[in-house]
Image (cartoon, helix red, strand yellow):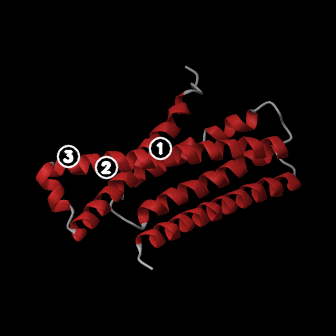
Amino acid sequence: MGKNTYLTGYFPLFSIILFSSSFGFYTEVYLVEQLERLGIYRGMTELFSVIQIQLALWFVCTLLFFMLFAALKLISDTLIELSLYFFSKESEGETLQRVRSGSWIFLIGSLCSIIVVKSSFLLPFIFLLSCFVYFFYFVFKASETLSTAGMFGLIFMHILFWICFFIGVSYAVLKVYKAFMSGIMPT
């Protein structure tokens, strides 16, 4: 029986669900601690049970992380295909097929994230490690169809894009935070 190429097509979805669940659980625990510290949690438990509050917070956090990871996957897939369009010597999509088998990397990383769900250091570390390992896997698999200049162009394009993306997002978040804080603080 031959290998079914569509089998790994579900791995990105499973990875996103598992990573979202892990980050959602960690964030839910953090939010409960903050609500307890602020004295809000006790009032909430008078209206709802502890389990209902925790499940609702976990669901909302998981949903937000799911949307974040799905958006990052969409951006990443677009960037991969765009970089292959610009720098690859082949146009049939064989490189893209070889690269897609790397979804195992994120699936393994997401399974590990379930194990270390309570660690504020290991959880993001495993996610970032999965991203870096996948990037090196991508460059290795794509290198067969790239010239030396194409290889440097592809790597530079990815690094430049993600640096600019995260600087831009960080700047926007800081501006919104500053505006929010100046709006609630008396002058």
Instruction: Provide the secondary structure element on which disc 3 rests.
Output: helix
Residue displayed at 61% across by 51% down: 134
Horizontally, residue 3 falls left or right of residue 83, namely: left
User: Eyeballing the image, is 111 above or below 184?
Assistant: above
Which of the two residues, 78 or 172, is positioned nearer the viewer here?
172
- Indicate the secondary structure of the residue bearing disc 1: helix
Q: Mark 3 points at which residue?
A: 52
Residue 21 visible, this orientation:
no
Outermost residue, top side: 1
The CA distance from mark 3 to mark 2 is: 10 Å
Q: Mark 2 — residue?
A: 58
Name the residue type under label 2: Trp
- Pick the front one: 89 or 13: 13
Q: Is residue 106 above or below residue 187?
A: above
Q: Which amino acid does label 1 sit on?
A: Ile
Question: Given the image, on which type of amino acid does mark 3 rest?
Answer: Gln
**Lower position in the chain sequence, tag 3 or tag 1:** 1
In the image, is 96 to the left or to the right of 148?
A: left
Would you name the residue on which mark 1 appears?
16
Of the image marks 3 and 2, the number of the one nearer the N terminus: 3
Disc 2 packing (10 Å; few <14; some 14–19; many ≥20): many
How many discs mark residues in the rendered view?
3
Q: Position of residue 82 (x, y in %)?
A: 76, 43
* Label 1, residues with CA under 10 Å away: few <14, some 14-19, many ≥20: many
Q: Is mark 2 on a helix, strand or loop?
A: helix
